[in-house]
Image (cartoon, grey):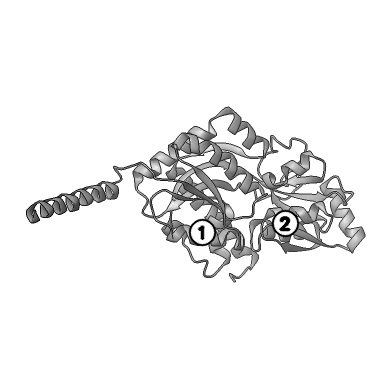
Amino acid sequence: MVQFQFRQLVRGVAKALAVGALLASGLVQAQTGPIKLMVGFPAGGGTDAIARILADKLKDSLGVSVLVDNKAGAGGQIAAQTLKVAPPDGNTLFLSHDHTISILPLVVKNPGFDSAHDFVPVAGFATFVNGLAVSGGTPAKSMAEYVAWVQNQGAGKGTVGVPAPASVPEFLVTVIGQKYKLDLQAAPYRGSAPMMADMLGNQINAGVGSVPDFIENQKAGKIRMVAVLGGARQAALPDVPTFSELGLTGFEDVPYYGIFAPKGTPQAVIDKLSAAVAKVIAMPDVHERLTAMGLTVGYMTPAQLAAREKAYTQIWTRIIKDSGFTAQ
């Protein structure tokens, strides 16, 4: 009896070691689920809406539940810190745009994470542009009319909402003010949703944010976008000029959206997740919905997303340095 129990124990240990070796080598690809797809901003904003579109389709492609987990705060910093310490099993992912991954490490002394060291790119799926929008209570219908309105109403002084402090939109407020000789002050919010609520309530006259954050209210006529960044007009906003057309150049490089996993996630799991993202964004209904939100949809492999993040970070390192901004 004792010998039988000992043999059973040995077999159990051997089996556990074998499974552990398979997991470590990435040969076991099945995920137990559900997958948490973290978003660093509140529900109701553009990034949240994008995450929910993808999560709904990824669950069918992967065969497990994919739940959007809003860990809002500090411009995505809380979500990024959570990803850093998450088990590297593919069950915790982070859907983010450029702000958290590329910009935060440049403007915060101790963000609590190192994007290049702590995260593994899974897939990029879109690029987008930022733009300036005015609220319904502002009569301006163009950039020139907005500039004239600020000059007349506030003697050249104005306040512009941005979805996060020390973000690309905040730097753009400064650049726009310099370009048009206006004293514009950025008003940082904790995400695009509360900023939009104040714009819709005419508590703030203008905001700078991403096209996906603005597009629905733009279509409904509740706000008006007067200019966008990027090298070309957006398909979803063909009547809105680029800042380049208006003489503000140097911001043609566009930000990105991607999905990231914790460092140490097996390559086989990354490959499986990346393939699922590629499949989902190629679906006609998903492609159409994301395009209608103002995204330029396009799959990026993990290596391509890593290269895109690196290049974007280098560009904004120079811009932020030239602005004289000091990391807080």
x and y percent of residue 71 in the render? 57, 57
Q: Which mark is residue 194?
A: 2
Q: CA distance from mark 1 to mark 2?
A: 21 Å
Tag 2: residue type?
Pro
Tag 1: residue type?
Ala
Q: Relative to residue 208, is residue 127 depicted above or below? A: above
Is 215 left, or right, of 151 in this rendering? left
Total number of numbered discs in the rendering: 2
x and y percent of residue 58 in the render? 50, 38
Neighbour tally class for label 2: few under 14, some 14-19, many 20 plus, Cα within 10 Å: some
Is 78 left, or right, of 32 in this rendering? right
Rendered residue at 36%/54% (across/down): 264
Is disc 1 placed on a helix, strand or loop?
helix
User: Residue at the top extreme?
Assistant: 284
Rendered residue at 81%/58% (across/down): 204
x and y percent of residue 9 in the render? 16, 54
Q: Earlier in the sequence, mark 1 or mark 2?
A: 1
Per the image, the residue denoted by label 1 is 80
Quarter of the picture holding the C terminus: bottom right
The front one of 58 and 119 is 58
x and y percent of residue 119 in the render? 44, 55
Residue 162 visible? The answer is yes
The front one of 325 and 136 is 136
